Amino acid sequence: MPVEAPRMAVVVTTIGKGDFLEDYHASALREQVLDRVTFYVIPDRKTPPQLYARCAQFQSRGLKIVCPTLQGQQAFLDRVGFGGLVPFDSDNRRNIGYLMALASDAEAIISIDDDNYCRDGEDFFTEHAVVTADSVTGPEVKTTDGWFNLCRMMDVEPAGTYPRGYPYHRRHAAQETVTVETTARVTINAGLWLGEPDLDGMSWLVAPARAHALEREELLLGPHTWSPINTQNTALHRDCVAGYYFARMGYPLAGMMSIDRYGDILSGYLVQACAKHLGHYIRAGTPAVDHRRNSHHYLRDATHEMGCVWLMEDLTAWLTELQLSGSDYAEVYASLAEELDHAAERFRGFVWTEATRGYLHQLAYCMRRWIKSCAVAEEMREAVTVAA
């Protein structure tokens, strides 16, 4: 771990009152990183005025917070060339926070949900700072089928629980697992979630789970080991952001199905493909957060998720065999967008309608636009660094 805490940005969208800020402020104080952390709290049209008051309260207590108005968000998007691509009333607005953080001097960018809370005694910021280290030595997990279930790192009831986004064709398969000591560069840190783990709607309907404690504090996922990564309690080195566009959801398909509620899972798989091509590792485990889940209608969730569940079955199989090119995240992400465009016309199966293919083409287009906007944000960051 770095001797001096790196500069960190925390990105969160919310239509709540900002109750989560209390715990993170306390953790930043205890870890003595208050001057190294900036929160990018992104409100939406349904966000109540109390959020702005809560942010002002914590700003007066020393917590750096950027909470842009809707007009300020739009002006920023226009400035970086991403205007018109981020809808209102959507978790896709997390992209605004990522771009703002990229335009700052932050070295690590941490993504949280507003129902994730720091745990007492957990070094939230210090643990996530691992993504800025030159190298990390720890246990690398390897499996015979190339997939690892992060829920196995926790004491979870019931047994056999899988996280949201884990391909169904890979669940409950016979698998051998070994760990070996490895030294590698880690650019993504996937913190876990106690209390109510991150499951899909179908799992909550048929087998609701409870995560009581971590059983493993750390595992490294290397070039041949995959697992879904969400945007709850996940940190990235700033270099990764050029490959971390939060995919737009709400795309209608045939019948009742739509592509929805998996924007973070899709973006997590795509950035993971870039990291693996570059030889970078993902670390999973600490810091764990308490997930005090916002109210959900699980039957409705499962209905909206079904299109993406089917999509992930084919996309994950394709991604694990894909050969990319490029020497940094922007170049590799551009290569991935091109491959996605080609693959959209080759997938076969009942879910692959013209609407589904159109969605992948739209995604590839947004990925290319994202790369350009990240480059503009980087130029803004250089100006901030010079001024500092």
Image: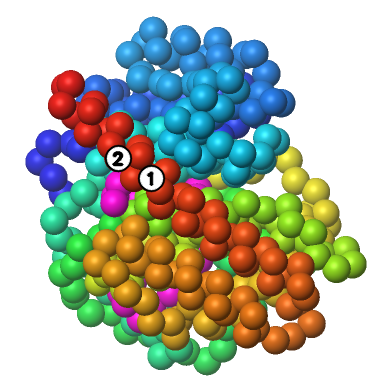
The answer to whether 106 is drawn above or below residue 323 in the figure is above
Residue 275 among magenta residues: no
**Residue 15 seen in render:** yes
Residue 221 among magenta residues: yes
Residue farthest right in this picture? 255
The answer to whether 95 is drawn above or below residue 68 in the figure is below
Q: Quadrant of residue 322?
A: bottom left
Who's the residue at 34% across and 54% down the image?
A: 240
Picture coordinates of residue 327, whole percent (x, y): 24, 67
Picture coordinates of residue 161, whole percent (x, y): 60, 69
Numbered badge on residue 96: none
Give left or right: position of 4 versus 189: left
Span colored in magenta: 219-239
The answer to whether 387 is drawn above or below residue 159 in the figure is above
Residues marked 1 and 2 touching at CB (< 8 Å): yes
**Residue 212 seen in render:** no
Who's the residue at 69% across and 26% down the image?
A: 45
Per the image, the residue denoted by label 2 is 378
Mark 1–mark 2 distance (CA, rounded to whole Å): 6 Å
Disc 2 marks a residue whose amino acid type is Glu
Q: Quadrant of the C terminus?
A: top left
Per the image, the residue denoted by label 1 is 374
User: How crowded is the residue under tag 2: few (<14 C-alpha within 10 Å), some, or many (20+)?
Assistant: many
User: How crowded is the residue under tag 1: few (<14 C-alpha within 10 Å), some, or many (20+)?
Assistant: many
Give left or right: position of 26 versus 129: right
Who's the residue at 38% across and 45% down the image?
A: 374
- Element on which disc 2 rests: helix
Q: How is the image coloured?
A: rainbow
Q: Quadrant of residue 59?
A: top left
Disc 1 marks a residue whose amino acid type is Cys
Task: Give the number of callouts.
Answer: 2
Who's the residue at 33% across and 14% down the image?
A: 62
